[in-house]
Image (spheres, rainbow, N blue to C red):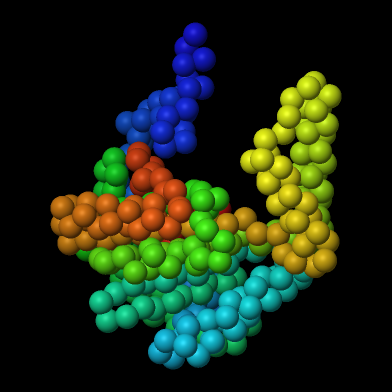
Amino acid sequence: MALLVCTVPTKDGQTIGEHVAISARYLLRSRWSSTELVEDTEGLEIQARGRARFRAFQLDHRGRLDLSGRDATLAHGLAALVDGIGASGPSRHVSVHVQSLEAGAATLLSMPNGSTKPEGWFANSRLAYDVTAMTPHRRTVLLERWRYVRTAEGPVAVLRIRDFSATPTGRALLERLQLSNGQLTLALHVDVVAGSRAKHVVERAVHRSRSDGAASLAAGFRRTARVEGHFERLAQREALVASGRALLRIAVFATVRGDSYDELRASVDEVKRAAHDSGLRCDRGAGRQTEWYCFQLPGGPGW
């Protein structure tokens, strides 16, 4: 009976058992942790839950990109970049961080050491410190609370976008979030799967879906429109990977900062409303804020 109760889902997508496990880990682990960002001649090294080395590039902003068409050019350039990484060898990690401030926006691209500078970007290690709110030669101490972490600069809450399925076709996924008020940084983490492994992964997923569908039809069950749509996406992904496109594992985090807890809570509520209006579903990460704070950092030390 206890096992059956643990499998009951809740409104945030997790089961009761998962909530119990998260609460137990939160009560047992240390409240204090730290992160550090170190620069050397080869690039940057971030030390959080693990160690990751990367190079930092800043986007060369030139006013309203949507009026000049450069946004589409940059998007195609990044797509070609990850396609090249996927075909070149082992899996690698790339992340894009967009920091929204009152004075404007700054965009950071983190890539593995040895990567060439993409067109439209220039090397800038200093921006990595600004985006992460870290200080050179000093560790950032984190005090974890249930729904946020507290640093010397103030409280920080990290949300994760976990569902894009309700976003209308043709609409930018994160546009409304970028227009939210407050101190917001959006982090798009991309794990580029190596070419040979990517083909094996998508072929296995399609085969498993077809086998499950055949078994369901043989048992007299009709596949729903949602299942049909999922199968179509799997088949499309298999075709794209077979044609040379990269297979990506994607995670999106929204990092909200505030000068006080009340300001932070108001900013988080606004970000959640903007996500809901855009057809996105986000998770507050209750009991896992230190873990998610490390996950959203450049370099992907948590992957």
Residue drawn at x 59%, y 84% as measured from the top left: 73
Q: Position of residue 77 (x, y in %)?
A: 63, 80
Q: Nearer the viewer, residue 241 or 200?
A: 241
Q: Quadrant of residue 217?
A: top right
Q: Nearer the viewer, residue 114 or 195?
A: 195
Q: Position of residue 193 (x, y in %)?
A: 70, 59
Residue drawn at x 35%, y 39% as measured from the top left: 287
Q: Position of residue 226 (x, y in %)?
A: 64, 41
Q: Quadrant of residue 195?
A: bottom right
Q: Position of residue 208 (x, y in %)?
A: 79, 38
Residue drawn at x 34%, y 72% as measured from the top left: 100
Query: In the visual, does 115 lie left or right of 139?
Result: right
Q: Nearer the viewer, residue 105 or 178?
A: 178
In the displayed image of the protein, which residue is found farthest to the top? 1
Q: How many marks can you see?
A: 0
Query: In the visual, does 162 lie left or right of 287?
Result: right
Residue 104 showing in the rendered view:
yes
Residue 152 showing in the rendered view:
no
Residue drawn at x 43%, y 68% as measured from the top left: 175
Q: Quadrant of residue 218?
A: top right
Q: Is residue 73 above or below residue 188?
A: below
Q: Nearer the viewer, residue 224 or 194?
A: 224
